[in-house]
Structures are given as structure tokens and as C-alpha cells.
Amino acid sequence: MRSYRFITPVIFLFVLLSGSISYAIDVSLTQIDSYDANCTVSQIEYSPVHQLLFLREAGTSVHVIDLQTNTEIANHQATEQFTDMDLTADSNYLFVADYGGERTGYGDPIRPHYVHRYDLQNRTWTIAQAPKIAWKIEAVSP
């Protein structure tokens, strides 16, 4: 069992009376929580808004942890192989790339590639086939 700690940098912002802004950054990190995982984690995403933690276990699955109850609420399996995941800036969706392989030098998929989306508000997964290669993913919110 591995223990993961959540840390956050502390940033201080000062506004001067003259209207100019100056700032100081405290580079120390503050632990805000920890979680003991029962898997080998290769990537982590955290939503402070929804108090959810996502642990990508190599290419096989994504574990969804509710940090309010400290319990795993979902263990979502890859169709092929998970290679990357990213949380939208508004913290409402997690996107996960499901890589189906490709012909070296041609860029053609060997098997279908998928994009998995987790809706953090409704706590549901949806899966759609990618039009080409899904390997790295970058979530963009409208």
C-alpha cells in the first residue's frame, strides 16, 4: 500500500496603496491530505472542487476516490490501454486517452482508440471512439 500526500504551494498577494501590485511567493509546500492507495499509480489528477482523486494505474484502469469519505467509488477499466488523463480547468470533467496501438511510421491505428470522459458532477463515465490516435490528451473547457 502506497501513501500519497496532497500538497499545495502557499502564495501571498499584496496590493499597495499606490495602486501597483507586488507579490511574494512562499515556495514551501503545505500538506493538505493523504491517501493510501492499493495500486501502483502512474498518474494523479485531483479536483478540490468535487473532492475527488483520480489514480491512473499504468494502462489498465482509473481509480476514482471520494476524499470526503476516503473510499474508492469507481474502478474504470481501459478498453485497450490508458496512456494519459487530464482534468478540465473548471474541474467538471476528466478525459482519459485509451490507446489502441499504431503502425510504426504510418500513424495508422492498429485497433480502435477511445476517449473516456468522467463527469464529476454526475459521477458517470462515457466512452467515445477517437477519430484517429488517442495517446496524449489535453482537456479544454468551453
Image (cartoon, grey):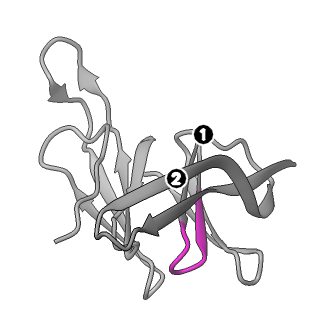
Residue type highlighted by circle 2? Ala
Indicate left or right for 52 with 126 as reference.
Answer: right
> In the rendering, at what x and y percent does residue 117 appear?
35, 66
> In the rendering, at what x and y percent does residue 89 appear?
34, 66
Indicate left or right for 138 with 60 as reference.
Answer: left
- First in sequence: mark 1 or mark 2? 2
Q: Quadrant of the C terminus?
A: bottom left
Q: Residue at x 66, y 44 (%)?
A: 41
Residue at the farthest bottom position:
122
SS class, disc 2? strand
Residue at the farthest top position:
105
Indicate left or right for 33 with 54 as reference.
Answer: right
**How would you rate the neighbour count of disc 2 (Cα within 10 Å): few for under 14, some for 14-19, many for 20 or more?**
few
Q: Residue at x 72, y 41 (%)?
A: 40
> In the rendering, at what x and y percent does residue 12 appear?
54, 62
| Nearer to the camera, 131 or 9 | 9
Residues shaded magenta? 47-54
Q: Residue at x 24, y 30 (%)?
A: 110
> In the rendering, at what x and y percent does residue 52 appear?
59, 73
Q: Residue at x 87, y 48 (%)?
A: 1
Q: Is residue 99 above or below residue 15?
A: above
Residue at the spot of label 1 = 42
Residue 31 inside the magenta-drawn segment: no
In which quarter of the view is residue 10 placed?
Answer: bottom right
Q: Are marks 1 and 2 in contact (CB under 8 Å)?
A: no
SS class, disc 1? loop
Total marks shown come to 2
- How far apart, in angstroms, are the residues tagged by discs 1 and 2? 33 Å
| Nearer to the camera, 83 or 102 | 83
From the image, state whether disc 1 or disc 2 is nearer to you.
2
Residue at the spot of label 2 = 24
**How would you rate the neighbour count of disc 1 (Cα within 10 Å): few for under 14, some for 14-19, many for 20 or more?**
few
